[in-house]
């Protein structure tokens, strides 16, 4: 008996040692393995007959696509979400969006904190890498990091409490809207829970037949949706900083200030653009009054950032509006948030670099602080790899579907930015195109920098510098 116990402990110890070595050698690779493993698990669960309303097996492509869209908190679908899934399937999807939205490693660290009431160094490093992509690189992180290692415990507490509190409050405030639209008390409570979770995690799934369009004139409900998506897209480090120093903006880090400023600017810029381009479109806002049109364009601007909800038919938007939506979805929300895209801080850093170059300054500066060049290198890498991913996927889907370019580009960027808005192309596309879109969602959520670091065999220290030579650029 003792021999069996010792053998079992030896096997467990070997597995634990192997996991420790993998985490130490490449936290990014470990994160991707856990993330992909969860997608495969949810694919299996969603394919079961108990998960479908008809009690039949869900086809592999549909279950895989839904699992990817769920864990990647995207909201794109290949089936009718309101009628295909059973109660068990809807619970699975709700759980998956929580895991994907808050972050796999962050949830694991929260559970470890709850069980042991403390965080070890390994858990702190995992949680830190989940909140700051710059930690994917070996070596010290400069002062530009959003959250310091000693603050990880507080951040995880903020993540858990803020996520549960925000979703609970929004669900409670949404409850009367469902009652007013004729839903039973139980259905109203369930739908309010679903919508609050989907809003905060920036997932565009809807489980009522008409979706958000059913609440087109309910500005109380739509405003709650805006608030949920906005808070989810800020990022947990920003929420943590705001809760820690709500009345002292001077103490906020550059990351917090850039995120807030860029988010507000893009929100109003997108709203103005949609207002100018769509005010006379009878298929969208052309038949609405002035005040209603302004509000609806503001709602659309917020949702194209990553929310994935729409009160109008996206396919009816003008081509110019679809292009504006492409831009907003490509940027996305804040770092370490439930939103996708290249992140607003990436856009801000690229803009600051261009501004510094235009002024002839040697270094980037913002809010009285210097931004190191390694941040710019990460930003350029994110931009280049993201654009390449979108271009390759768009070309492949164009070849497969022969669909219009603006519709293909919109759905591909929506997938990469984990937004969830669609022109209808995704649901009607062949299986091969849907698998490509699923891969784009996975790339968008995992992160191009994390993926690049994970694929690297090792980090090589170079003990010499080659002679410098300047190629002509521009």
Image: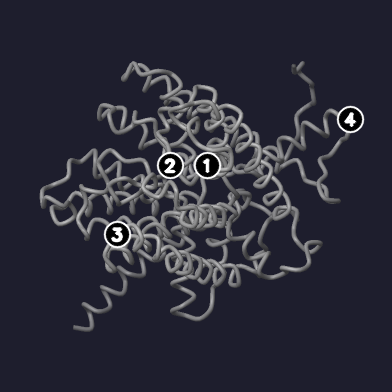
Disc 3: which residue: 182
The part of the image, by quadrant, that contains residue 412 is top left
First in sequence: mark 2 vs mark 4:
2
Disc 1: which residue: 296
In screen coordinates, is 210 left or right of 239? left
> How far apart, in angstroms, are the residues tagged by discs 3 and 4?
63 Å
First in sequence: mark 3 vs mark 2:
3
| Viewer-side residue, 148 vs 269 | 269
> How far apart, in angstroms, are the residues tagged by discs 1 and 4?
42 Å
In screen coordinates, is 54 left or right of 258? left
First in sequence: mark 1 vs mark 4:
1
Disc 2: which residue: 311
Label 1 Cα crowd, 10 Å radius (few <14 / some 14-19 / many 20+): many
Disc 4: which residue: 360
First in sequence: mark 3 vs mark 1:
3
- Answer whether labels 3 and 1 touch (C-beta < 8 Å): no
> How far apart, in angstroms, are the residues tagged by discs 3 and 1?
24 Å
Which circle, 1 or 4, is nearer the viewer?
1
Q: Is residue 456 visible?
A: no
> How far apart, in angstroms, are the residues tagged by discs 3 and 2?
19 Å
Q: State the scheme by which the image is colored.
A: one colour
Q: Secondary structure at mark 3?
A: loop
Residue 246 percent coordinates (x, y): 71, 68
């Amino acid at each position: 008996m003792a021999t069996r116990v010792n053998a079992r402990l030896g096997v467990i110890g070997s597995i634990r040692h192997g996991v420790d070595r993998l985490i130490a050698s490449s936290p990014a690779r470990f994160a991707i393995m856990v993330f992909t493993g969860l997608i495969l698990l949810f694919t299996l669960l969603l394919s079961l007959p108990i998960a479908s309303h008809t009690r039949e097996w869900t086809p592999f492509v549909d279950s895989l696509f839904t699992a990817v869209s769920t864990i990647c908190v995207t909201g794109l679908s290949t089936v009718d979400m309101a009628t295909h899934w059973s109660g068990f399937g809807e619970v699975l999807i709700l759980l998956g969006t929580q895991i994907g939205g808050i972050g796999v490693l962050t949830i694991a660290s929260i559970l470890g904190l709850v069980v042991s009431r403390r965080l070890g160094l390994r858990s702190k490093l995992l949680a830190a890498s989940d909140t700051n992509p710059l930690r994917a690189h070996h070596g010290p992180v400069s002062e530009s990091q959003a959250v310091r290692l000693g603050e990880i415990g507080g951040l995880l507490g903020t993540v858990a409490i803020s996520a549960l509190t925000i979703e609970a409050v929004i669900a409670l405030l949404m409850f009367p809207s469902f009652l007013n639209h004729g839903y039973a008390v139980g259905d109203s409570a369930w739908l309010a829970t679903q919508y609050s979770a989907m809003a905060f995690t920036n997932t565009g799934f809807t489980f009522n037949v008409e979706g958000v369009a059913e609440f087109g004139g309910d500005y109380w409900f739509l405003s709650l949706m805006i608030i949920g998506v906005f808070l989810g897209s800020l990022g947990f480090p920003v929420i943590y900083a705001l809760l820690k120093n709500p009345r002292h903006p001077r103490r906020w880090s550059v990351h917090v200030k850039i995120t807030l400023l860029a988010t507000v600017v893009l929100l109003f810029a997108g709203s103005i653009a949609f207002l100018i381009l769509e005010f006379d479109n009878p298929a969208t806002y052309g038949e609405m009054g002035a005040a209603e049109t302004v509000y609806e364009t503001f709602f659309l601007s917020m949702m194209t950032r990553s929310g994935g909800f729409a009160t109008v038919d996206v396919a009816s938007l003008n081509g110019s509006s679809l292009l504006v939506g492409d831009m907003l979805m490509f940027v996305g929300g804040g770092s370490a948030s439930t939103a996708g895209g290249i992140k607003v801080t990436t856009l801000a850093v690229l803009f600051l670099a261009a501004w510094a170059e235009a002024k002839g300054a040697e270094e980037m500066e913002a809010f009285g602080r210097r931004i190191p060049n390694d941040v710019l290198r990460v930003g350029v890498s994110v931009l280049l790899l993201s654009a390449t991913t979108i271009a390759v996927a768009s070309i492949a889907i164009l070849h497969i579907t022969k669909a219009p370019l603006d519709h293909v580009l919109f759905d591909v960027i929506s997938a990469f930015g984990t937004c969830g808005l669609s022109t209808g192309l995704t649901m009607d596309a062949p299986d091969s195109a849907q698998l490509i879109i699923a891969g784009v969602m996975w790339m968008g959520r995992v992160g191009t920098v994390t993926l690049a670091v994970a694929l690297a065999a090792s980090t090589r220290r170079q003990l010499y510098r080659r002679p410098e030579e300047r190629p002509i650029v521009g």
